[in-house]
Image: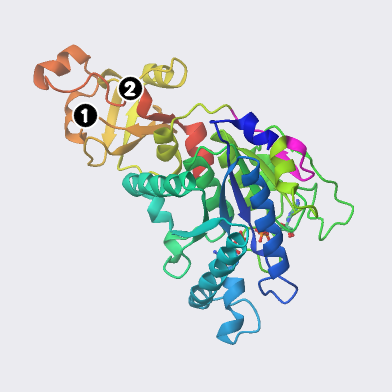
């Protein structure tokens, strides 16, 4: 109650990702008690005034037994069939457990291509906001039964961090079977020590973590760190940990008192549009620019003008995303072009006043600052 008054109109958003390993029993089946405990945790967050979105795994685990299988299927078709059976059962249980607390919940299934198109990305955002405004908890999962390999995330850590970025959430909680990051995989090395706090996640740390996962999980700790880095870079604080025994443990985590690993967020310096460009877009072409343009884009916070362009590659149109490289061909970022490739080819290296002579309606900037993201964001977001 006190928390609700403190938060007031400016309600914070928390994305809670619950991994397979935290939803299942020792036979790999959906564990009712564990699910109930997570729903309690979410309920306490909501009672304290937070907007909560759940990203829940568990469809495959909830479905494979009904297909007559004794263990989690390994083939794509097997996983998709198990998810088709299990997703319904999973969401049914969520609905019953939330309903018992007087709360509604809604199933939202996403595939990667839903977020790659800017229109569908904004659509997903509008749907989630609509549900949240009406106090309904979205329960998101990857649409496993239709996603094919090329368009799969595969684990829900990445999906959860993209959802946290989409909603510009305050917190991402990654609930798993290990209480955060350890100096080594604690299931193999009992003497591994917990790491309680990280200011940032660099590539070296990600490479150090072994790629192993729990029996039924898909991502492992490495995938959680990649997801956490993506979220943290877009201004979302992250907590990785196991479900605490008391029902308020999620609340404790978002108050900064969780006992897993907490990762600090970078200042939120990119708009939602820039976030989409960085994390989801596919460039339609490439522009090579000179050192002056590199300096303007990376150091001075400027836009890209025709005079700084050396070469253009590919055929594209106004509004497409293009990658920009330095004179050596090293990518420095990407952005929305306001010029089609044919025009850029004609006016590259020209001063803006000269461009006006042949294209009076052309804007001054080929890529405006507001539509630009540097490669620091682009690289880490896409890895
Ligand atoms: N350095 C590490 N610290 C903690 N866990 C690690 C580490 N390296 C690997 N892991 C593994 O990551 C697993 C958790 O990821 P995962 O199996 O994907 O769970 P989930 O289903 O919750 O997403 C742990 O069970 C552990 O085996
Ligand atoms: N979408 C799948 C989840 C895949 C998976 O296991 O993810 P995770 O638990 O995050 O390692 C399912 O619902 O079974």
Instruction: Kindly identify the residue that appears in the image at 46 percent across and 44 percent down.
Output: 133
Secondary structure of the residue carrying tag 1 is: helix
Ligand 2 has an atom within 8 Å of the beta carbon of the residue at disc 1: no
| Span shown in magenta | 256-266
Considering the image in quadrants, where does the N terminus appear? top right
Of residues 245 and 71, the one drawn nearer to the viewer in this rendering: 245
Residue 261 among those drawn in magenta:
yes
Q: Give percent across and percent down for residue 197.
A: 75, 37
**Mark 1 touches mark 2? (CB < 8 Å):** no
Q: Is residue 352 left or right of residue 222?
A: left
Residue 42 coordinates in the image, percent (x, y): 64, 51
The residue that mark 1 highlights is 344
Q: Can the viewer see residue 141?
A: yes
Answer with the quadrant where ligand 2 appears in the image: bottom right
Q: Residue at x 82, y 60 (%)?
A: 188
Residue drawn at (29%, 24%) of the image: 309
Taking 177 as reference, is 66 above or below it? below
Please identify the quarter of the rendering in which residue 300 is found: top left
Front one among 329 and 182: 182
In this orientation, which residue lies closer to the viewer: 288 or 2?
A: 2
Graded by Cα atoms within 10 Å as few (under 14), some (14 to 19) or many (20 or more), the crowding at tag 1 reads: many
Dot 2 corresponds to which residue?
Answer: 304
């Amino acid at each position: 109650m006190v928390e609700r008054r403190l938060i007031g109109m400016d309600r914070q958003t928390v994305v809670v990702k619950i991994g397979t390993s935290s939803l299942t029993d020792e036979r790999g089946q959906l564990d009712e008690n564990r699910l109930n405990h997570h729903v309690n945790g979410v309920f306490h967050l909501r009672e304290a005034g937070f907007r909560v979105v759940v990203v829940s795994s568990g469809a495959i685990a909830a479905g494979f037994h009904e297909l007559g299988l004794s263990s989690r299927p390994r083939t794509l078709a097997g996983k998709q069939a198990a998810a088709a059976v299990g997703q319904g059962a999973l969401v049914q249980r969520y609905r019953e457990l939330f309903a018992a607390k007087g709360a509604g919940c809604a199933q939202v299934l996403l595939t990667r291509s839903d977020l790659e198109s800017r229109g569908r990305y904004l659509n997903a955002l509008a749907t989630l906001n609509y549900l949240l405004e009406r106090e309904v908890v979205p329960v998101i999962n990857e649409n496993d039964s239709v996603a094919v390999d090329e368009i799969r995330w595969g684990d829900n850590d990445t999906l959860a961090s993209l959802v946290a970025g989409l909603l510009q959430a305050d917190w991402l909680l990654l609930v798993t079977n290990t209480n955060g990051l350890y100096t080594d995989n604690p299931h193999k090395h009992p003497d591994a020590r917990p790491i309680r706090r990280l200011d940032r996640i660099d590539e070296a740390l990600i490479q150090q973590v072994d790629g192993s996962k729990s029996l039924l999980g898909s991502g492992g700790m490495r995938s959680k760190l990649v997801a956490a880095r993506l979220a943290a870079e877009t201004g979302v604080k992250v907590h990785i940990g196991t479900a605490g025994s008391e029902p308020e443990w999620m609340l404790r985590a978002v108050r900064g008192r969780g006992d897993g690993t907490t990762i600090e967020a970078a200042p939120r310096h990119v708009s939602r549009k820039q976030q989409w460009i960085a994390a989801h877009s596919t460039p339609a072409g490439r522009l090579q620019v000179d050192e002056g343009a590199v300096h303007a884009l990376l150091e001075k916070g400027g836009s890209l003008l025709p005079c700084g362009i050396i070469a253009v590659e590919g055929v594209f149109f106004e509004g497409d995303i293009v990658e920009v490289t330095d004179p050596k061909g090293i990518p420095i970022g990407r952005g929305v072009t306001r010029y089609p490739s044919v025009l850029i080819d004609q006016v590259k290296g020209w001063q803006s006043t000269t461009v006006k002579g042949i294209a009076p309606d052309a804007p001054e900037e080929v890529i405006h600052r507001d539509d630009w993201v540097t490669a620091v964001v682009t690289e880490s977001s896409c890895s």
